[in-house]
Amino acid sequence: MIDEKNLEPDEEISCEDEEQQMFEHFRFDVDKGQSQLRIDKYLTDHMEQTSRHRVQLAIEAGYVRVGDRTVKANYKVKPLDVITIVMPYQRHGFEVAPEPIPLDIAYEDEDLLVVNKPAGLVVHPGHGHFSGTLINALAFHLGLKQAADEGDERMGILVHRIDMNTSGLLVVAKNDEAQLDLAKQFFYHTIDRKYIALVWGNIQQDDGTIEGNIGRDPNDRMKFKVFPDGSQGKRAVTHFRVLERFGYVTMVECILETGRTHQIRVHMNHIGHPLFNDDRYGGDQILKGTIYTKYKQFIDNCFKILPRHALHAKTLGFVHPRTKQYILLESKLPEDMTALIEKWRKYALVRELDEES
């Protein structure tokens, strides 16, 4: 289970980002004196704050096993059975107050909605952010309220997160059926996600793939790092393609195959190209360029234009849980990233003209 107190507000938590962070894991060793009972009834009786409906949905999704095989809801529990179940995590124990925070909704229907999250908006309450979050805004939008001791299962159910200072698309389930289905798509890496990033340095190759386990940095728990030997962390794969070069920085498109915490930020830093103005991974320093005062002033102005790391979740594609139709959504670059890229584009052009003259 997630320890809400130990989550940083800008950590991305998705299904494949440490499976245990998205799913609660349960194991039940059935007593030898247990009478035969439908497994959905048995699990409902033995799991706190879990409805029979949610248990049945988990069974239908294949998340419940007896021994090494999946079972149906009408399976009769027998003495000494070993039952295992994973269920999408459902947070309890804090109050979510509806707040009239504007939402930029890219798509919405009875089952889910996709939000175009602005940079700076914390996704979920916790770690010093108990109001002014995306969840508070969703509670207002959906007309819901979750008290500290009850938990409304209809609260906009987050299937994944993006960092506080990352802008872009985020899908939210409105019901248990949608949550379980979308969670499964994330878990099996069938969700399509593309990000736009501006990174330090001139990436030589036009495209490539970065592979390397990502885990928490043992020397700094606020950061994550790549463990190339696979000794720690979880498998992480990022594909990238160069979109435009500006000499000292490069604009890239990143496609997530997995979704580890800070994955793009960590992987790009690992290959020597940290995100522009990423204060956690060293991108808020001048890493490429000249020693002239005029250039330093130019970079300072760039940092002011984009006072965050340069990362935007541009594309999100998934199969709709109910209709089974493929939905592909795109989000325009926000104004701060657009202005930054245009500033670098003009700088690169002037520099090229100077070199030719």
Image (cartoon, rainbow, N blue to C red):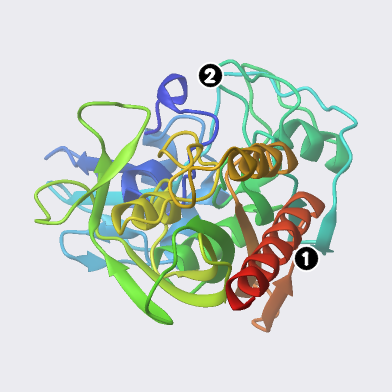
- What SS does tag 1 mark? loop
Between residues 181 and 228, which one lies in front from this camera angle? Answer: 228
Residue drawn at (58%, 72%), measured in percent from left and top? Answer: 355
In the image, which disc is placed on residue 72?
A: none
Q: Say what amino acid the circle numbered 2 marks.
A: His
Q: Amino acid at mark 1?
A: Lys
Give the answer, above or below, for where 346 lies relative to 137.
Answer: below
| Looking at the image, residue 107 lies above or below residue 121 | below
Residue 204: x %, y % from top left: 38, 75
Label count reads 2
User: Percent position (x, y) of residue 79?
Assistant: 15, 47
Q: Is residue 155 left or right of residue 237?
A: right
* Percent of width and height locating residue 265: 43, 50
Q: Residue at x 75, y 62 (%)?
A: 342
Q: Which tag, 2 or 1, sits closer to the chain's start?
A: 2
Circle on res. 127 = 2
Image-quadrant location for residue 16: bottom left
**Which residue: 41% across, 38% down?**
282
Query: What percent of the width, then of the height, locates residue 167?
Result: 68, 50
Q: Nearer the viewer, residue 250 or 66?
A: 250
Residue 110 seen anywhere in this rendered image of the structure: yes
Q: Tag 2: Cα neighbours inside 10 Å, few (<14), some, or many (≥20)?
A: few
Tag shown at residue 332 = 1
Tag 2 near tag 1, CB within 8 Å: no
